[in-house]
Image (tube, coloured by chain):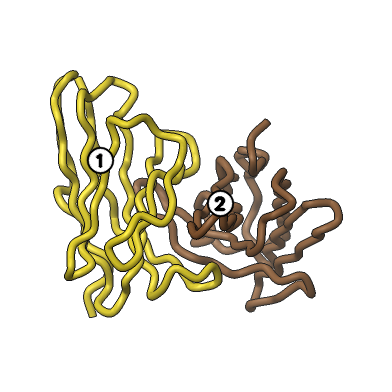
Chain colours: A brown, B yellow
Amino acid sequence: RKEVEQDPGPFNVPEGATVAFNCTYSNSASQSFFWYRQDCRKEPKLLMSVYSSGNEDGRFTAQLNRASQYISLLIRDSKLSDSATYLCVVNISPNAGNMLTFGGGTRLMVKP
Amino acid sequence: DAGVTQSPTHLIKTRGQQVTLRCSPISGHKSVSWYQQVLGQGPQFIFQYYEKEERGRGNFPDRFSARQFPNYSSELNVNALLLGDSALYLCASRISHFMNTEAFFGQGTRLTVV
């Protein structure tokens, strides 16, 4: 079983739609959580951190359920520029280390 | 301000060769991590260095090694290259090794092994 699992998609949605991505993680020792965005053939960039209380940044809302080991990302009013791969990321700190564990990514395509 | 810089951007090697990839973190950042991203998958953790010491190692064979220099730049070395080592190699820079600090990625080195 993968440590971080995501539906690979693609999710094809029209402009203006609301779309939700889910992610599950297996390591209960995971301590911090993020969504990264990766455009085609580019490096990942932090979209937002995810907190237990849930957090919102403009059209983006992230939620964390520690009991179910589940993370979600909601995008409202989708724009063409939102087309990208969205990576669910958890941070595990074994020993003195600090490693980001990535899901396989969910591909979003927003169409006119 | 310069972001994370990696060199070279593209590289083609033959099986059995050795390769060295380089990374310069953002100025003031002391933590550097390396990730391998195979096409169609998410990045996979290889190493983390902080203050020139190895702080974490992923599930990669001993053919992979790295080091961090006094100026916090880093090199990733891969020996005895295999076809399966073909991937995008990403370097991530953090101001410290604490878990909640944001990781900034370089544009990556795309390695093709033929």
The disc numbered 2 marks a residue on which chain? A
Q: Is residue A14 above or below residue B42?
A: below
Quadrant in the picture for residue B49: bottom left
Q: Tell whether B61 sits left or right of A15.
A: left
At x 70% / y 47%, what residue is drawn?
A27
Estimate the x, y position of residue A28 in percent, counting from the top left: 74, 51
Q: Judge the density around disc 2: few (<14), some (14-19), many (≥20) Cα neighbours within 10 Å.
A: many
Quadrant in the picture for residue B107: bottom left
Q: Judge the density around disc 1: few (<14), some (14-19), many (≥20) Cα neighbours within 10 Å.
A: many
Q: Tell whether A25 sits left or right of B37.
A: right
Quadrant of the frame with the C terminus of chain A? bottom right
The reply to whether label 2 and label 1 mark residues of one chain is no
Q: Which residue is farthest right?
A: A67
Under circle 2, the secondary element is: strand
At x 17% / y 42%, what residue is drawn?
B10
The disc numbered 1 marks a residue on which chain? B
Estimate the x, y position of residue A1 in percent, counting from the top left: 68, 30
Number of marks? 2
Q: Nearer the viewer, residue B61 or A55?
A: B61
Q: What amino acid is found at the position of numbered circle 2 in the picture?
A: Leu
Under circle 1, the secondary element is: strand
Quadrant in the picture for residue B80: top left
Reading the image, the residue beneath label 1 is: B110
Can residue A112 be seen here? The reply is: no
Q: CA distance from mark 2 to mark 1?
A: 19 Å
At x 71% / y 71%, what residue is drawn?
A51
Q: What amino acid is found at the position of numbered circle 1 in the picture?
A: Arg
Q: Nearer the viewer, residue A74 or B17?
A: B17
Q: Tell whether A12 sits left or right of A101.
A: right
Reading the image, the residue beneath label 2 is: A87
